[in-house]
Amino acid sequence: MKTSKWFSNYKILRNESRNFLPIEYKDKLFKIYREAQYSDELAEDFNSALIIAHIAINELGLNKAALCTVMLYPLIKHNRYELESIKTDFSEEIFVMVNGLTRVKNLYGKTSTMETENFRKLLLTFAEDVRVIFIMLSERLYYMRTLHQKSPEAQLNIARETSFLYAPLAHRMGLYKIKTEMEDLSLKYTLPDIYKEIARKLSETKKGRDLYIEKFIAPIKEKLTSLGLKFTIKGRTKSIYSIWNKMMKQQTTFENIYDLFAIRVILDSELEKEKAECWQVYSVVTDMYQPNPKRLRDWLSIPKTNGYESLHTTVMGPEGKWVEVQIRTERMDEVAEKGMAAHWRYKGIQGEATMDAWLKNLRDVLENPDLKAEEYMDEFKLNLYDEEVFVFTPKGDLYKLPKGATLLDFAFAIHTNVGSKCIGGKLGNKNVTISYVLKNGDQIEVITSSNQKPRADWLKLVCTSKAKQKIRQVIKETETHEANMGREILLRRFKNWKIEPDEARLSRLAKKLGYKTISELYIDINNENIDILDFKDSFLNFDKKEEPAVENVSAESYKGNDKLGKDDVLIINNETKGVQYSMAKCCNPIYGDEIFGFVSVTGGIRIHRKNCPNAPQMMAKFGYRIVNAAWEASSNEQGICTLYVSGRDDLGVITNISSLISKENSVTLRSISIDSDAGSFDGKLVLTVKDVKSLERIIQKIKNVDGVHSVVRN
C-alpha cells in the first residue's frame, strides 16, 4: 500500500500546526498513522482528512482538539482504533468531539428529510460541540471543491444537499464567505447552463470592474471628506447564486438586475446623528447621480423585523449602468452582517437562551485576533435544543417533540389513528411500551392493533397537547357510542319485558346510584358493569320502600359494617358462601391477578383486576362500593382471558401459535379469530387459564414466535 501521498500531506500539516498542536498529540497521531493497517478506502479517507484539516485550520481557524478529531475519525470509521482509547491517549474533550462527529455521520443512514429545519436542529443537538459542525462544514467545502471528480449523479446529490442543508447552516453560524462559495458551487452542478451563462456575463465586465468602481466612488469620497464625515466605502459584485436567486424572485433576466454592482458607504457616526448623516450621504450621492425613484428602500425609519437598518438607492452611474448604493453606519453594518447576535449587543439584551444570542458570543471569539481566545471554543457546547427530541419513523421521516414525550405522543404525532391503536413499538430489536420516553435520534416502529382503543389513563402517559386532545376526543366519541349502545340494550330489554321506560325515573335512579349523568349509567350497562336483571328489579321497585338484603350485599346497604367490613377481605374460592360474586367480563380476572370487589346495584359482587380499565372510574365515583378481595392460596378456579396478537402475516405463524398453546397443560384455546391486511395480521385468542403464571408463560412463548410483533392481554 502506497502511503507517500498522505505522509507528504501529513508532514505539511504537522509543520503548519506546530504553533498550536501539543507535541505529544503530534507524536501520538503520527504513531497511530504509522501502525494502522491500510486499505484503499482508509488511505483515501486519510488523504481527504488531511485536506479537510487544512481547510479547518486556515479558513475556519480551528486547532488543537478539532484538528485531532479530523485526523482520528477515519481510524474510528474503519475500526483501526477504539473510540474509548481517545479518553486515555488524548483527552475527554477530543473523545466528545469524535463521538459527536460519529453520531452526526450516523444520522445520514436514518432520514430522507434532511432539508427540514428539524434535521438541522437535530444535527446541532447530536454534534454537542460547535467545532463538530465546523468540521462538517470544512468537509463539505472540500467535497464541493472536488466535486468534478465525482459521477454526475453524485454531483447532483451532493450539490442539492449542500444547498438545502450546509449553506443555510454556514449562514446560521455566521460563516458568510463559506456559505457564498457553497451556494455558487451548488448552482454550478445543479443548473450548470445557468451558472455558466451568468458567469460569462459577469466576466464581460470583470476587467473594468475595479476601474469602474473607483471612477464611481471618487467624487463621492471627495465630497464626503469635505463635509467632515468619517466613513469607508466598499465596492462588491454579487455572487452568481445571489444573482440567480434574484432573477428567480423577480421573474426577470440578467440584464434587468439593477444591483450587479453594489457600493456600500459605512459611516462612523454617533448614535444620535446616525439617521441625519445617512440622509446627508444620500443627498450627496443623488446630487451626483440620477436616482431611480422606484428603487429607494428606507429601512432607517422602519427597520426590518430582523433588526436590519440601511438606506438603499439605485442610481445611474457612468456609462449608463445602474448601481445600488447602500448607506449605513458601523453599528448598522455589524447588525446586517451578524444578524440579531450583533443587534443584541447594541440593544443591551443579555442571555444565551437562543441560537442568535449564543452566536453573538461565538462570533466574538472567532473574530478575536488573540490566538489564545480560541481556547474559549472549548466552552461552546451545542445543547441549544435540550427542550426538544427528534425521532425518526422507519422510513426516515423526522418528527420534533418536546422533551419527555413518549412513544404514545410520537404515535399521535404521526396520525390520530396510529395513536389510537398503538400498543407499543420496536426500537431496533427491542420492544418498548407506549410509555417509553423518547430519546434524540430514536428510530421507532409504532406497533398497532385494531382491538386497541384510547383509555383515560393514557392522558397520564402523554405530554403533547395534540395527543391529549385526540385522546380526550376519542374517549368522548367512544363514551357517546357506548352510552347510545347501553341505552339501546336497556330499551330493547324493557320492550321484551313489556316495561314502559320512564326517563324521569331512570334519571332519578341513576342519580341515586351515584352517577353524575344518565349517560354514565348507560355506559356501565353497555360494559356489563351493571347486571341488567338486577337493574330491572331496581327500576320496578325504585318508588317502593326498600327492605334490607338478607343474603346479598347491595350497593346501598354496604357501608362497611355488613357481612364484609371495610378491613375485611373477600376470599375467592369455589366454596365461598354467604356472598354472591362473579368475575367481571370487562377484565376477566384469573387466579394470581391482584383483584378487588365491586358491589353491584342490587346485590352480588363483581371481581375486577386492579388494573382493569374501568377501575379508576369505579374507585373515583363509587369508593364506598369497593370491597377488598383476594384469592385463596389453594384455589383451583380457572379463568377466561383474551389475548390480542399482532405481527407479520407469514405462512405458518398462526399454526405455530396454535401448536404452542395445545402443548400447554394449564392453558386451553377456546376460540381464535384472525384479520389480515397488507402483510400484517391482528388476532384475538380466547383462553382458559389456570393462573397468571401459566398465562405469562404462554404469552412469552407466543412473543418468541418468528413474525409476532406484540401480545397484549385485554
Image (cartoon, rainbow, N blue to C red):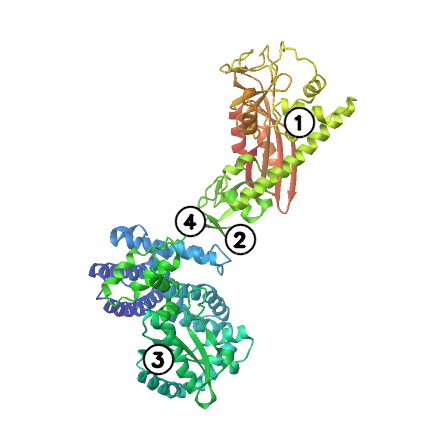
Quadrant of the rendering where the C terminus is positioned: top right
Q: In whole angstroms, how far apart are the C-alphas of marks 2 and 1?
A: 44 Å
From the image, state whether disc 3 or disc 1 is nearer to you: 3
Dot 1: element: helix
x and y percent of residue 151 in the render? Answer: 48, 70
Q: Residue at x 69, y 22 (%)?
A: 532
x and y percent of residue 527 in the render? Answer: 64, 29
Q: Amino acid at mark 4?
A: Glu
Quadrant of the rendering where the N terminus is positioned: bottom left
From the image, state whether disc 3 or disc 4 is nearer to you: 3
Q: Amino acid at mark 1?
A: Ile
Q: Amino acid at mark 2?
A: Lys
Q: In whole angstroms, how far apart are the C-alphas of marks 3 and 1?
A: 85 Å
Dot 2: element: loop
Q: Amino acid at mark 3?
A: Ile
Residue at the disc numbered 3: 233
Category of crowding for the residue at label 2, using alpha-carbon neighbours closer than 10 angstroms: few (below 14), some (14–19), many (at least 20) = few
The disc at residue 395 is 2
| Total count of labels | 4
Report the front residue among 57 and 234: 234
Report the front residue among 569 and 505: 505
Looking at marks 2 and 4 on the same chain, the residue that comes earlier in the sequence is marked by: 4
Residue at the disc numbered 1: 525
The answer to the question of whether label 3 and label 1 lie on touching residues, with beta carbons closer than 8 A, is no
Looking at marks 3 and 4 on the same chain, the residue that comes earlier in the sequence is marked by: 3
